[in-house]
Each structure stands twice: as structure tokens, then as C-alpha cells.
């Protein structure tokens, strides 16, 4: 076949270009993989989420931006705690490199999970369907919520609390 060079007969410059090309591609793929593994955060990577159980006391505060005094606090029952744990474990997030984030959603949620074993509570601040921030984790940076149904799911969980006795 004209123009066909068997791999074993390549010599010199052709072989070097081929090796450098594949090597460069491998380095680029490795860099992309490392960047993805750093920036992607699964819910399982949030410390203490796996320890959430029915024995925990979970309080969710809901308020509008700048209206902390008008917040509504909900204490979750055992079923709601399991739903919240499932929501956290099945969600994925992306690290934000900036210290300040801009957002449109005015709904704010503070989730406080107190463990019965004397461990420090897990504190999660949620900005609507856009960001969460986990106290003392991820260098204090926000995580972008990749689950578009996050806010609706969280509202659904606390709505059950309002229906079964109301906010505290």
C-alpha cells in the first residue's frame, strides 16, 4: 500500500513524534483527571454525613436573605433525617476556588446536625439551589450544588415537619 509505514519500521524522527504525541496526550488526560477529582465533591466526602442517624438531633432553619430574625426552625423526625442523609449522600458538588460567591436565590437554609456521641455538630449553610458551605471543611469555600432538585427536596423534607406539628 502506498504511504503505509508499518510500526516496526519507523525510525528516528517519526518514532519520536509519535511517542511525544502519545505522551503529551497521556499527561493532558492525567491533568484533566486530577482537576476533576479535586473539583468534584460527592456527598460522601462531607465529613460526618455517614454518621447521621435517627439518634441525631437535626434542626433546619429557613429564612430569606437578610431576614435571619424572621427564620423558621424545623426539627426533623427520624424519617426526615433519613431523607436528608439520602439527599446529602446522593448529591454532588463542585468546589469554588473564589472566597466570595454571587447568587440570585434569596432562600437560605442552615442545617445543624448534632450527634449524640459528643462529636462536633455538622453545620451546613445552604444558599437556595446554588451553593452549600460546610463549616470547618473544604477550606471554608462554597460548593456549587450540582443537583438541580436540591432546594425542592429540602423544602419537601421540611414541609413534612410543618405538616406534622409545625416549626419550632
Image (tube, helix red, strand yellow):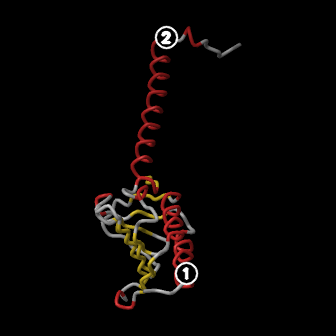
Quick check: 29 above or below 3? below
Q: Secondary structure at mark 2?
A: loop
Q: Position of residue 117 (x, y in %)?
A: 32, 61
Residue lying at 43% horizontally and 55% vertically, measured from the top left: 50
Does the residue at mark 2 contact the one at mark 1 (Cβ under 8 Å)? no
Would you name the residue on which mark 2 appears? 11
Residue lying at 54% horizontally and 66% vertically, measured from the top left: 83
Residue lying at 46% horizontally and 57% vertically, measured from the top left: 43
Q: Quadrant of residue 51?
A: bottom left
Quick check: 14 above or below 44? above
Is 44 positioned to the left or the right of 69 in the image?
right
Tag nearer the camera, 2 or 1: 1
Is 91 positioned to the left or the right of 2 in the image?
left
Quick check: 18 above or below 12? below
**Quadrant occupied by the C terminus:** bottom left
Q: Secondary structure at mark 1?
A: helix
Would you name the residue on which mark 1 appears? 159
Using a 10 Å C-alpha cutoff, classify the residue at mark 1 as few (fewer than 14 neighbours), some (14 to 19) or many (20 or more): some
Q: Position of residue 140 (x, y in %)?
A: 29, 63
Amino acid at each position: 500500500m502506498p504511504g503505509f509505514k508499518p510500526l516496526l519500521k519507523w525510525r528516528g524522527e517519526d518514532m519520536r513524534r509519535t511517542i511525544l504525541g502519545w505522551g503529551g496526550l497521556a499527561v493532558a488526560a492525567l491533568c484533566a483527571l486530577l482537576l476533576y477529582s479535586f473539583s468534584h465533591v460527592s456527598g460522601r466526602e462531607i465529613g460526618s454525613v455517614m454518621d447521621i442517624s435517627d439518634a441525631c438531633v437535626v434542626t433546619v432553619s429557613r429564612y430569606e436573605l437578610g431576614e435571619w430574625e424572621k427564620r423558621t426552625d424545623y426539627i426533623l423526625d427520624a424519617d426526615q433525617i433519613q431523607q436528608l442523609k439520602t439527599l446529602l449522600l446522593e448529591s454532588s458538588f463542585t468546589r469554588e476556588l473564589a472566597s466570595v460567591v454571587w447568587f440570585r436565590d434569596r432562600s437560605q437554609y442552615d442545617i445543624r446536625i448534632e450527634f449524640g456521641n459528643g462529636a462536633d455538630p455538622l453545620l451546613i449553610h445552604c444558599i437556595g439551589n446554588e451553593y452549600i458551605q460546610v463549616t470547618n471543611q473544604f477550606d471554608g469555600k462554597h460548593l456549587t450544588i450540582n443537583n438541580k432538585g436540591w432546594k425542592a427536596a429540602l423544602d419537601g423534607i421540611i414541609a413534612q415537619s410543618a405538616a406534622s406539628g409545625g416549626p419550632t
